[in-house]
Image: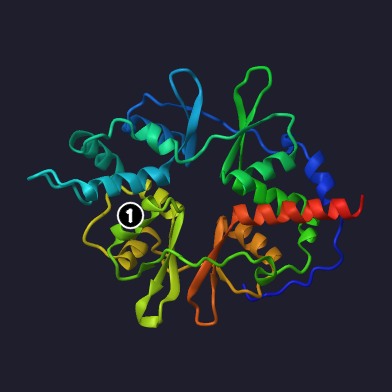
Amino acid sequence: MSKQHNVGSVVTEGIGFFKEGSLEDFPEEDVFEIDSRLSTVSAFEKLVEKGFHSAPVTDAKGSHVGFLDLADMVTYVINALHRSSAPGVEPPDNVSLKELILWMNRHVPDSADITVNLSARNLFRSVPANSSVLDVLTLMSEKNVKRVAVIDPVSHKIVKLITQSSITKMLIKDHEEVLKLLGNATVASTNMGFIDDMKTVSSTAAAVNAFEAMDKYSISAIPVIDRKQDNKLVAVISDTDLRALVTKDGFKVYGINVTEFLKIIKPDDPFKVFSVTSKTPIVDIFNVMNDNHIHRVFTTNDKGQVVGVITFKELLGFLVSKAKKKYIQHN
């Protein structure tokens, strides 16, 4: 991401588009919902069958309690097995995720409410079908949600889901002029991308340590560092990698380190990671996220050490703020 873009004059129409942009511009989706009373295995099978990463969960009264995400399910299952200490009972290894879930339901206490508990991690937020794009962007940036449900005013059913990926594509491909609002802003000028207590995992650490950290701190990705290279950022384990485990007929959970796990899950390019510096233009980050279907980039210093992360949520918040300021200045 060393390429620099010199953005020209800043337009002021962006806020108008945000307010007037219709949610009809986003494609309809085959939205399905998961009954909270379903067993963990049944909920898992439903997601895999539909080919979805996540789905809204409804309780017995029909109220939405959150979104069930495959990545959350993977981290929880592996960590539950890791914590299990039943005498004489060893969790299986080199098996499919479904087999792990089945084993957990039989041997791990308090596994009955996993579907509800995991879905509660991902808050359910919705907007009426006549809402503006600005309504959705504001909700995502202020409430820290990855997806927003669009509700039909007559049937009161979900007609589509607006995701981070669909928002990114809209901003870059369909309305590139909106990105001009970013001007020449860089990582340094926005004060984004710097975290004092950044969570990392060593490339030689046990793979399960990465899963535990992601589950404990509710983070969707954890940077991998190389101790032999002065803690340089060398890779990342993300929720996308965890979802990829779903397609594996069998995988080894214990006895492997982070590097071995990366080579299993991403054999073509296990050490592919996107990072930026304090000088990187914000517009470049939008483009990289869209081109590579990612929702975060890590910030590194001159030594290549990770010092923070910039998430899609932060970028949205910055863009909305810039748009509103431009609107106020010209009205």
The residue at the far right in this view is 331
Task: From the image, tell me which residue sits under label 1.
Answer: 212
Quadrant occupied by the N terminus: bottom right
Residue count near mark 1 (Cα–Cα under 10 Å), binned few <14, some 14–19, many ≥20: some
At 71% from the left and 39% from the top, the residue drawn is 135
- Residue 98 image point, x, y percent: 29, 39
Q: Can residue 240 be seen in this view?
A: yes
Is 147 located above or below residue 56 in the figure? Answer: below
Q: Residue at x 22, y 49 (%)?
A: 83
35 w.r.t. 24: above or below: above
Q: Position of residue 100 (x, y in %)?
A: 25, 42
Residue 3 left/right relative to 254 = right
The quarter of the picture where residue 268 lies is bottom left
Percent x, y of residue 177: 81, 56
Q: Which residue lies furthest to the left in this view?
A: 88
Three-letter amino acid code of the residue under disc 1: Glu
Foreground of the two, 56 or 307? 307
Q: In which quarter of the image is residue 310?
A: bottom right
Res 270 quadrant in image = bottom left
**120 on left or right of 252:** right
Question: Which of the pair 195/147 is nearer the observer?
Answer: 195
Q: Which colour scheme is used?
A: rainbow
User: In the structure shown, which secondary structural element does the residue marked by tag 1 occupy?
Assistant: helix
> In the visual, does 132 lie left or right of 315?
right
Q: Is residue 252 left or right of residue 283?
A: left
Q: Looking at the image, how many numbered discs can be counted on the residues? A: 1
Q: Which residue is drawn at 23% across and 57% down?
A: 254
Along the line of sight, which residue is nearer the eye, 299 or 286? 299
Q: Is residue 52 visible?
A: no
Taking depth in this image into account, of 245 and 325 the one nearest to the observer is 325
Q: Residue at x 25, y 40 (%)?
A: 99
